[in-house]
Amino acid sequence: AQSVTQLGSHVSVSEGALVLLRCNYSSSVPPYLFWYVQYPNQGLQLLLKYTSAATLVKGINGFEAEFKKSETSFHLTKPSAHMSDAAEYFCAVSDESGGYNKLIFGAGTRLAVHP
Amino acid sequence: SQTIHQWPATLVQPVGSPLSLECTVEGTSNPNLYWYRQAAGRGLQLLFYSVGIGQISSEVPQNLSASRPQDRQFILSSKKLLLSDSGFYLCAWSVPGTLAHASSYEQYFGPGTRLTVT
């Protein structure tokens, strides 16, 4: 079965600094990969997705992620953090076990941005 | 465009009381529907999914049940709440079918319901 590991449950950066949120996946077939963001007391919103069209994927709010098959990684980055980026971020991998399409989510990484 | 609604937004219930949370989707037909729970400080736990009316599958045995009485309506219920049922409940939908394409995996989430069992 597919699985997702997000390294670091909490990440803290200064405003203007690079944001790097790590995601490693385990999949027996070429996967689709997703990053979602969750602001406090809200649902999840799609940031970006990897669909095999391009290994570098650009998303909303200046985020991007690079799919590296050799490293089984899909890390999320943003060159310059903004206070409004403070939220929880979830990486997810596609899965077909059980006969239906679903997503397997990582445990999440809470990003704090300080002045 | 498609929208997803959940209500209530917040709920405080005593232990042993019943529960009913509702989720509705607009702007699409025959969606796949999902119920997730987020306990405090924890990730997403898939509780139920449905590929059609009356078709419910449970991912985790528990004190909860789900029903899909209409195509775009998904209900999460309990006869007697436990303290451990507290959490943030999220409903999500995805496009119907089992196409091997990214769009068939992408899920769209509702605003969630915060449940506190006292």
Image (cartoon, coloured by chain):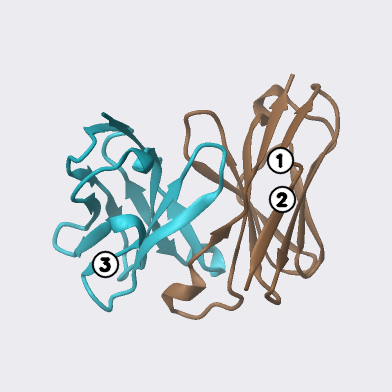
Chain colours: A cyan, B brown
Which residue in the protein does label 3 denote? A57
Name the residue rendered at 70%, 22% in the picture.
B83
Residue A5 in the image: state x and y as whole percent.
31, 45
Element type at marker 1?
A: loop
Element type at marker 2?
A: strand
Q: Which mark is residue B6?
A: 2
Residue at mark 2 to residue at mark 1: CA–CA distance: 7 Å
Residue at mark 1 to residue at mark 3: CA–CA distance: 34 Å
Q: Which mark is residue A65?
A: none
Which residue in the protein does label 1 denote? B9
**Between residues B98 and A43, which one lies in front from this camera angle?**
A43
**Between residues B105 and A16, which one lies in front from this camera angle?**
A16
Residue A12 vs B102, above or below: the answer is: above
Cβ atoms under marks 2 and 1 closer than 8 Å: yes
Cβ atoms under marks 1 and 3 closer than 8 Å: no
Residue B110 in the image: state x and y as whole percent.
62, 53
Query: Which residue type carries mark 1?
Result: Ala
Name the residue rendered at 34%, 56% in the picture.
A61
Query: Which residue type carries mark 2?
Result: Gln
